[in-house]
């Protein structure tokens, strides 16, 4: 999914926030904003631009995990939320998908008056059921997103385990934004929750086809089920020209994505496929 004019403000805010969290000086901010303007002129997807900017800020500040404290806070909030909300979501396919989608945004269920039984979730369940139950492969590849997401994905992992499948849960090798990384897996002892966590091998938001290696590449190129959490994974995978089905689970957090997928901002969705050849919605 290519950038639109609406993406400019979000990416600029990311630069300013990251430089600030990194303790960067005014010259560091100026250099980063200058790079942003150059990258913006070249175009691309929001994650690709963000990745170049975040690497630049790491290099000039020497701070490689500026979102570390906020990730710890997010994880602690997720632990608390799981205890309060898990029982509202049955361990069925639809219940697990809803719970996974809910975890893609920490702000919604922290609000006063949140009703876990009526949050705005949409999914073509018949298509998703057919895709999953007709798949005979034993392995599932799940691409993680934010730190808090992981705990909300455990119910869906458990659902696949009940089907006799083995889920490979992929997270970033090195820290980037508030995405879950192997460093966080060790810090939060996440393999105590689920042991089969693997690395994407990169420090990037989303994934690039050319960077797929090892188990991830093998599963992607097989007939295994692939699940991708969050906007960053959607925005990058939608550039793969629809080469295989992907189950995307995410919250619509911005207007460009909402317009692309025909859902209002704030919607929680699960869809098979994505877009290809421009900004047209496409189910695979």
Image (cartoon, grey):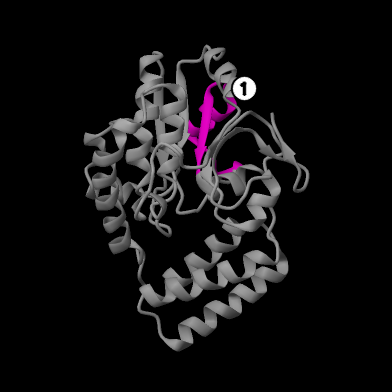
Residue 272 at x, y percent in the picture: 61, 31
Residue 234 at x, y percent in the picture: 58, 44
24 magenta-colored: no
Q: Residue at x 67, y 69 (%)?
A: 40
Residue 55 against residue 139 in the figure, above or below: below
Residue 204 against residue 195 in the figure, above or below: below
Apparent side of residue 280 relative to residue 184 in the rendered image (left or right): right
Residue 214 at x, y percent in the picture: 47, 33
Q: Residue at x 34, y 24 (%)?
A: 158
| Camera sees residue 115 | yes
Instruction: Locate the C terminus by quadrant.
Output: top right
Callout 1: helix, strand or loop? helix
Residue 53 against residue 155 in the figure, above or below: below
Figure quadrant of residue 248: top right
Q: Nearer the viewer, residue 226 or 198?
A: 226
Residue 93 against residue 43 in the figure, above or below: above
Residue 121 at x, y percent in the picture: 52, 38
* Mark 1, residue position: 127
Apparent side of residue 243 relative to residue 21 in the rendered image (left or right): right
**Callout count:** 1
Q: Residue at x 60, y 73 (%)?
A: 36
Badge 1 crowding class, 10 Å Cα cut-off, few under 14, some 14 to 19, many 20 or more, is: few
Q: Nearer the viewer, residue 173 or 138?
A: 138
220 magenta-colored: yes
| Camera sees residue 45 | no
Q: Which residues are magenta?
A: 209-229
Q: Residue furthest bottom?
A: 26
């Amino acid at each position: 999914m290519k950038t639109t004019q609406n993406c400019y403000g979000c990416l600029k805010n990311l630069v300013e926030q990251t430089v600030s969290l990194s303790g960067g000086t005014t010259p560091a901010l100026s250099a980063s904003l200058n790079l942003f303007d150059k990258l913006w002129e070249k175009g691309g997807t929001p994650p690709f631009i963000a990745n170049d900017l975040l690497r630049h800020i790491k290099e000039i500040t020497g701070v490689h995990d500026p979102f570390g404290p906020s990730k710890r806070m997010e994880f602690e909030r997720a632990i608390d939320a799981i205890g309060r909300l898990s029982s509202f979501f049955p361990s069925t396919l639809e219940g697990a998908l809803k719970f996974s989608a809910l975890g893609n945004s920490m702000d919604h269920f922290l609000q006063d008056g949140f009703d876990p039984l009526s949050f705005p979730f949409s999914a073509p369940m018949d298509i998703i059921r057919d895709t999953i139950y007709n798949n005979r492969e034993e392995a599932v590849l799940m691409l993680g997103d934010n730190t808090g997401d992981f705990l909300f994905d455990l119910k869906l992992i458990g659902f696949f385990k009940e089907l006799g499948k083995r889920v490979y849960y992929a997270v970033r090798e090195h820290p980037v934004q508030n995405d879950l990384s192997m460093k966080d897996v060790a810090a939060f002892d996440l393999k105590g929750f689920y042991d089969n966590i693997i690395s994407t091998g990169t420090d990037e938001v989303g994934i690039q086809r050319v960077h797929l290696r090892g188990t991830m590449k093998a599963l992607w190129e097989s007939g295994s089920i692939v699940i991708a959490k969050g906007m960053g994974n959607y925005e990058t995978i939608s550039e793969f020209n629809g080469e295989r089905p992907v189950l995307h689970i995410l919250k619509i957090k911005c207007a460009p994505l909402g317009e692309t997928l025909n859902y209002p901002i704030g919607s929680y969705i699960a869809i098979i496929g994505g877009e290809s050849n421009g900004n047209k919605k496409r189910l695979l």
